[in-house]
Amino acid sequence: MLINCVAYQDGRKLADLPVADISDYIAHNDAFVWVAMRDATPPELAEMQHEFGLHELAVEDAQRGHQRPKIEEYGDSLFVVVKTVEPQGEELVVGEIDIFVGHNYVLSSRQNSSHDLMGVRARAEREPHLLRHGAGFVLYALMDAVVDRYFPLVDAFESELEEIEERIFTGTSQRDNIERLYDLKRKVMTLRHAVAPLLDAIGKLHGGRVPAVCANSQEYFRDVHDHLARIASILDAIRDTIATAIQVNLSMIALDEGEVNKRLAAWAAIFGVLTAFAGIWGMNFEFMPELKWKYGYPLALAAMFSVSFYLYRRFRKARWL
């Protein structure tokens, strides 16, 4: 679905265009066209391919979707894929923005994403001195808007991890803690799969040999690269902390089980002594004089109680009971 199609010249908006007029405007070197689409259908992409002269392999990737974040060069044009990651309840929804960039055009198509990029266009139009850089600056603005929306997710991950770490030592369900840690780890890896490939790819847009369309915006792409590097570093730290927290949680479970085993062993020792006494005096031998002694029964009970009480005190002192 077409959202908007606008022509710009010298950093200023010229007009809203019908799709059929795109090829006429991009024929002028002093103007560029910025088109935004959402959930574009194959016929719509085919029409855009005809108007912009897009490479067929890039259009094929956009039609298929589910691409890895990447930046590919096709002659003087670029095909860029960035992932949107949006919270939806307890889950993360991964979307995709495909961006075609040429000397005098930008075409963006977002799929499975509720991210509204209208704010990017409004921001660019408020800064005509930057929009004058053309398609390269628009590509930066789109990528920067997506990357900036990763930061709230990272903050949420850190807050959730701190909460789980506090719960580990408060006697709450260790099973619940492990389930939450693994769920958090899955979310972290989802975001990292969006960040890491893009971090590697964006290095093509600043320093060294840079595509001509981005030559005047290298410092802006370097800023996006720095943001991605910081996010990737934080995600790696969170992942390592999660692994440590899982090990600590498992250790706490082992300690709890050890405490239970010690209690069971202590009571088993006490009742084992009672069983030994009862077993000895329960034998039916003829020559056991204490069995016919007047005070044999109470003395046997006293001996059993005394030994059991002694063992109980010893285990209590050793913190086994």
Image (tube, rainbow, N blue to C red):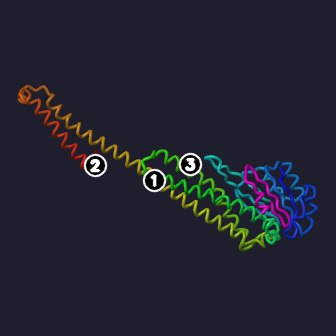
> If you read the primary sequence from the N terminus, does the residue marked by circle 3 or circle 2 appear first?
3
Secondary element at tag 3:
helix
Q: In this picture, which residue range is highlighted in magenta?
A: 100-122
Q: Is residue 288 left or right of residue 128?
A: left
Most foreground residue, 56 or 308:
308
Task: Please name which of the two marks, 3 or 2, marks the residue nearer to the observer.
Answer: 2
Q: Which mark is residue 319?
A: 2
- Label 3 and label 2: CA atoms lie apart by 36 Å
Secondary element at tag 1:
helix
Amino acid at circle 3: Asp
Amino acid at circle 2: Arg
Image quarter where the C terminus lies is top left
- Label 1 and label 2: CA atoms lie apart by 25 Å
> If you read the primary sequence from the N terminus, does the residue marked by circle 1 or circle 2 appear first?
1
Give the residue number, with chain letter if any, for mark 3: 183
Most foreground residue, 132 or 300:
132
- Label 1 and label 3: CA atoms lie apart by 15 Å
Secondary element at tag 2:
loop
Furthest residue to the front? 126
Residue 119 lies in the magenta stretch: yes
Q: Are marks 1 and 2 in contact (CB under 8 Å)?
A: no
Most foreground residue, 319 or 50:
319
Residue 82 lies in the magenta stretch: no
